[in-house]
Amino acid sequence: MPAPINTLKHRLIAGETLHGIWLGMADPYAAEIAASAGFDWLLIDGEHAPNDIRSISAQLAVLRGGPSAPIVRLPIGDPVMIKQALDIGAQTLLIPMVDSAEQATDLVRATRYPPEGVRGVGSALARASEFSGIADYLTTANEQICLIVQVESVKGLAALDEILAVEGVDGVFIGPADLAADMGLLGAPDHTALREAVYEALRRIRASGRFAGFLATEPDFIEGCKAAGGNFAGVGIDVTSFANGLRGLAARFGG
Ligand SMILES: O=C(O)C(=O)C[C@H](O)[C@@H](O)CO
């Protein structure tokens, strides 16, 4: 019995446009509610949300086997954190702040068992192997891992072609907020220079044969990113939807 097929990975690589949102509530009940919405994927954010390995594991558990594929974003591209995330059952990882092909190469190796990589072997007690229930997990896991690296700096954009050439990088995500900050456009996702830089990067990523990701909440920016080839389409954030929904009610009915 092999490792679970990562259908999200194969659909994105095939060029399908798949929509999803960020999960920042760091709570399995909120993740379960998000899963009822019908998105193709849900990203459990371990970078900017108060998540830890336990809360990420609990959210993976409630999303398991559901209609929305889970993705885990780690706070940093650390091999130890990658090992833990894969062992609790994540098959698709988003790693922020990747600026070079060397970083990308190290990240690929951290997600693969030897000889392709250096992922530590602990599947005997891991959800990833169904707690040793998947007899062939060790020899079939590598193929089902989906690695998405975030390019979100001027330096990263300059190295984009080299990053795209790294075998094992399945997709590249352009982080508009951090890229804007690094371009001197902090807090200005609607700035023309930022948007053009994002669109150009998305076009280059798709031209390379990888899938291209983005996160935008403004409808015109979402459509612009999709028109540029963005097919790993982040279109919302649970926290801001929740907060803005309550603020709207309070404005209408509040004391
Ligand atoms: O830089 C970005 O944009 C992202 O990586 C997404 C942000 O981290 C997310 O928190 C929305 O601002």
Image (cartoon, grey):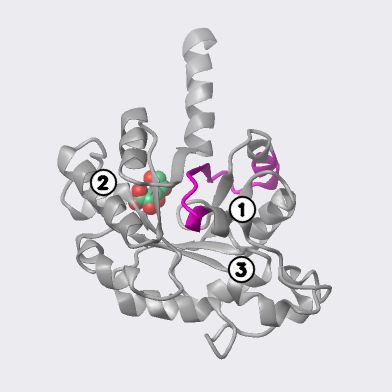
Foreground residue among 98 and 101: 101
Residue 115: quadrant of the picture: bottom right
Residue 167: quadrant of the picture: bottom left
Q: Would you place residue 147 above or below residue 47 in this image?
A: below
Q: Where is residue 190 in the image (x, y as percent from the top left)?
A: 24, 35
Foreground residue among 60 and 10: 10
Asked if the magenta segment contains residue 23, the reply would be: yes
Q: Where is residue 61 in the image (x, y as percent from the top left)?
A: 73, 55
Q: Give the range drawn in magenta.
A: 12-32
Q: In the rendered structure, which disc, 1 or 2, sits on the residue that comes first in sequence?
A: 1
Q: Report, in whole angstroms, how far the alpha carbon at label 1 lies from the one at label 2.
A: 26 Å
For residue 194, which numbered disc appears in the image? none
Residue underneath mark 1 = 70
- Visible residue check, residue 180: no
Q: Report, in whole angstroms, how far the alpha carbon at label 1 lies from the one at label 3.
A: 13 Å
Q: Can you tell which of label 1 and label 2 is closer to the viewer?
A: 2
